[in-house]
Image (tube, rainbow, N blue to C red):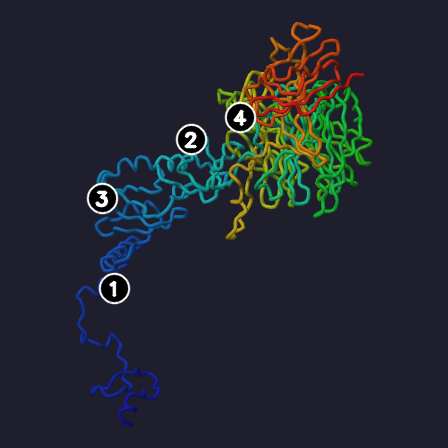
Amino acid sequence: MGADRNQWQYPKNVGGKVIGWRDDGKGMENKDWVSPADLDGKQDHSANLDELAGVDPGSSGKSILALDLSSDVRNYLDVPPYVATRTELKALDTTKDATVLLIESGRVGVFKWTTGDFSTQIAADTQEGIYVKATAIASSAGAWVRMYWGDASLLWFGAAGDGTADDDAEVTAALAVGVPLDGLRRIYKVNSKPASFLNIRNAAFKVGNVIYPSREYMRTDTAKITNGFMYTAWAQDKSYKVGTQLRVWVNEKESHADGTGRIALYFSDDGGATWSFGEYLSAKASGQTLWSAGFDGTSEYLFVRVPAGSTDVAPYTYTMWKRALGAAGSENYNGTWTKTNITFPVPSGFTGQPIMVHSFTVGHSSSIVVGASYGEGAAVMRSTDGGVNWTATILGTGSDFEEPTVRYHAASGLYIGFMRNGGSGEPRYWRSTDNLATVGYYSAATGYFGGGANSDSCVSFDVDDDGYIHAVTAYRNGVIEGEGTDERVSAFYLRGPVTSGNFWTDANTQLFNIGQLPRREQGGASALSQGSVIVEEDKVHLFYGMEERTGAIGALGVGNRAANIYQTVIFLDDRGTMFDDRADLAVNRAGTSQLRKIAGIPAWVTPSTDANNWAPTILSGRPNFARHTSTLTIASGVLTLTGTRSGLYIIDTEGAAATDDLVTITDDNAFDGDTIIIATSTSTRDVVVKNGTGNIICGADITLSAAFDAIMLMFYNGNWHRIAFGDNAV
């Protein structure tokens, strides 16, 4: 074993020697080195070896030799080749390579040679995203076809998706292929938006300034938050958050042209997932309307416009409703309001009180600020004493400056807002860098929203904790937009930084077309643009009125024209949790009850038509019998009750006779338990209620001989039974 082991040991190092095997093969030894020149033909080799050794093939020859070597290797390796470009892919020998990996930037993928007629696909796929023609083979015989699962990427067609480079040709080609496309959450600059988003996912298309997102790119959810056959609208920039509650104030009328109405509140305690029944500020219909509302962290403010008469017509004055809500988590939402008549200052060159008061913000030095719109221009009003006294700052003069919105961004010390352009121009962004000592504004460029000018539309907004503006607006009617119809118009969602510069041209400002919404109001409606915005956690809430039922302009009556408040939620984030609160939104988020609460007292009301100022029925410990607006006349002993089901009816004798018998009361809609009160119109004409002659049972004939006399009757089993009689002659 020792000898065997030693024979494999290397010999000692000796200069000029080389190590080799011994002649008997047993071990290694030092050997003499012999140069090739001393071989003297002892080693045979090719006859042209020496000649070849002196030949330089050059760069071309080396390239050919390398290709030949590569080809030989490919004949023995069963793996797909890598090609850097589509040009190399097209040049491959399809008899040797059937599967190829393309590593071209943005287009990486596996292509398979597929026989068949692909002439149609190749003609459509001009950007070679999925189908690539081989150089030497007709497209009718075969093509290189991309192998993939799921949706095709727009990047495969050469699109940049950076919102800056022109991707129109690439997107057009991708859509022409007709396969589902994934935009990878990128923005593609194109000449026009796709005609259909059926095959598009996670993509947004920028046309000029306007971005058109797919559903997956910008997830939204829209539903009603009111549900009634009344004209519930005008949520304009008077919605806000108190603690965890979202509060949306609106004006509710019987029809758009109704000069009377009520102010109503809708609220959500679950982040906008579901909404309450309405709460009336006052049960009595009047010409008073609410245009501005807000919360300063302690108190809630409402700015109510008061007409000169009983209907909503100028000239106007204002009443401020205010109440302390209490500490967060223990708010008293049923607290008492205090009402203060306020007079806003009249800016130089302006006349009277504002036509409308808009928006609300807590300004510098704990002040409160609202916007004011006059026929002569727009201004903001600031109060340092809780709304008693005010100072004015003019934002712009002339009838083109209308309906200003306002927010104070404490972190930057900026006042910012938007103004409606009542003329033919685009809306304006305004700002003040010196606490309203001076102001400046920037108008959006012509065509900024696409189509015609977005004139006569408001811009409502809110600011998030990161200093970003979230705003909403919409075309006033579809004819301006170029739709050729007033049935629908585009709505827009803007987001961009609070800035002392031009918000419209800021590199970080984005304008999204969030779709077309119905506009059934004849002549156009501001609707969504007269909306409100609340930024709440990772959601943006948009509130606006949408007309659902149309009727003759100016006509009044129950349900003649109906509108409801809608909520669109834009989701800014996905928390990636098992419970996704984005999905916890009711399909119809509106409260189904038609009851309305009265603020400040534990009572409910049921809405009724306001066209003739009929009062609602109040449901509380004190019965309320709403009066029928018309005095009804007896005809041949019959009193016919039709139309509105009222509680109190004033009646008169037939032909204004001095006396008349009431024998029968007819009401086709009467139900058992219905209760009415009947009184005479005047003490000069007596009504004798006949007992048992017709369908009235009252024990004995009763004469209503004075205007204060009244009889209460209850309907049961086809007859009207006396409950009480008041002989109130004085």
Does the image show residue 429?
Answer: no
Using the image, tell me which numbered label, if any, was put on residue 195: 2
Please identify the quarter of the rendering in which residue 276 is found.
top right
Real-space CA distance between mark 4 and mark 1, rounded to the nearest whole angstrom? 93 Å
Of residues 82 and 576, the one nearer the viewer is 576
Q: CA distance from mark 2 to mark 1?
A: 68 Å
Q: Which residue is mark 3?
A: 115
Task: Identify the amino acid type marked 3.
Answer: Thr
Q: Amino acid at mark 2?
A: Ala
Which residue shows up at 75% across the image and 14% down it? 706
Q: CA distance from mark 2 to mark 4?
A: 27 Å
> Badges 4 and 1: C-beta atoms under 8 Å apart?
no
Question: What's the residue at 24%, 42% (across, down)?
Answer: 142
What's the distance in space between the residues labelled 3 and 1, CA to CA? 47 Å
- Pointers 2 and 1 in contact (CB under 8 A)? no
Amino acid at dot 1: Ala
In the image, residue 186 sits, relative to residue 341, either above or below, namely: below
> What secondary structure is marked by label 4?
strand
Q: Are marks 4 and 3 in contact (CB under 8 Å)?
A: no
**Tag in front: 2 or 1:** 2
Q: Amino acid at mark 4?
A: Glu
Give residue 53's mark. 1
Mark 2 residue element = loop
SS label for mark 1: helix
Q: Position of residue 200 (x, y in %)?
A: 42, 39
Q: Position of residue 6 (x, y in %)?
A: 30, 91
- In the picture, which quadrant includes the C terminus? top right
Which tag, 2 or 1, sits closer to the chain's start? 1
Callout 2: 10 Å neighbours few (<14), some, many (20+)? few
Q: Residue 507 falls in which quadrant of the image? A: top right
Disc 4 crowd rating (10 Å Cα; few below 14, some 14-19, many 20+) is some
Q: Depth-wise, is mark 2 or mark 3 nearer the camera?
A: 2
